[in-house]
Amino acid sequence: MGRIMIVDDDEEHILVPLTRQLGRVFGDENVNGVTSVAEALQYAEREAVAVVVTDIMMPGMDGFEFCRQFRANPLNLGYIIILSGRDGGIAEGLRAGADVYFRKPYDIEDLVAQIEKGVDVARNRLFSLQDPLTGLYLRRIFDAVFNLESAKLSRVPSPLSVIMFDIDHFKQVNDTFGHHTGDLVLKDAAELLKKHSRKSDLFVRYGGEEFLLLLPGALESKAMEVAHRLHDAMGAHLFPDAGRVTASFGVATTHRQPASLVARADRALYAAKEAGRNQVMLASAEDAAP
């Protein structure tokens, strides 16, 4: 399951005791407490959060704004429980993205039951966005995150890279060994390549035997380094029944034109195939020109 995150600036009376109580139920390794909204948002960028338990009244940013910012990231699928000791605010909390509004003082057994429900809800949300074969995110998640990163790029120029790759001669794998083996190759390749990509990158199944990796903040040199690492991992791997299976890679980077980034990576991938497959190709600088 994903992490349970407690957000409350009252360390002595709420955060520490609640974190300990929930740790005894769900395991200390699955429960994390933070004292500020900024820290909570940063934590959610590093870890998959299944359930958030947040106070409303906190310095800097209240719980309602936290809900809005948390939900702005399409990868944040966690179930949000708002804790509040004040009257009113239920409608605002739900509209901001919270799932349930819990009154203080609360019964710990009631809260535990609500968290257990939240874990199941978050799991179902995740399954609805995952490819059932490989477990990778689906293309629509890439599109949502890509739009988010593109908006950031328009405000603060920074590098954004894409690696597009697909399995070479995949039809031949299916024709020779059968579709069951082909499915196993796709699943095995996804697990292998995810293990060799950066944790901060978004890895999706783009369609068929084609995959796409979004690398926020990655310069061209870093994207090429990652692509070569993935390429080498594929080349060194023995797939059950199918043996050696290779892949072709196209890499593109931009600081200013995200709209054409995926198309440029696609053209670089096509060039890699035209050059004989089983290699990494970088989108040309001329390709990036307006």
Image: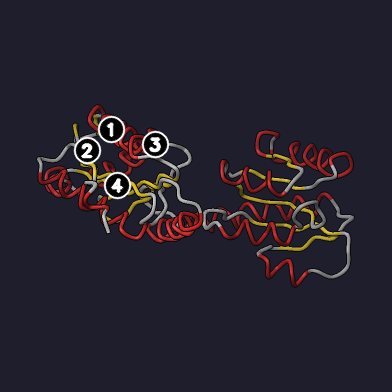
Image coords of residue 37 (percent x, y)? 71, 49
> Which of disc 4 and disc 2 is earlier in sequence?
4
Which residue matches tag 4? Answer: 252
Marks 2,3: beta carbons within 8 A: no
Tell me the amino acid under the disc marked 2: Val
Look at the numbered disc 3 and give the secondary structure of its residue: loop
Label 4 Cα neighbours within 10 Å, binned few <14 / some 14-19 / many ≥20:
many
Marks 1,4: beta carbons within 8 A: no
> Does residue 33 lie above or below 146 as drawn?
above
Quadrant of the rendered image containing residue 246: top left
Given this view, does label 3 or label 4 mark the residue nearer the observer? 4
- Residue that appears at 40% across and 61% down: 140
Label 1, label 2: how far apart the Cα atoms are: 7 Å
Marks 1,2: beta carbons within 8 A: yes
- Residue that appears at 73% across and 40% down: 33
Which residue matches tag 3? Answer: 197
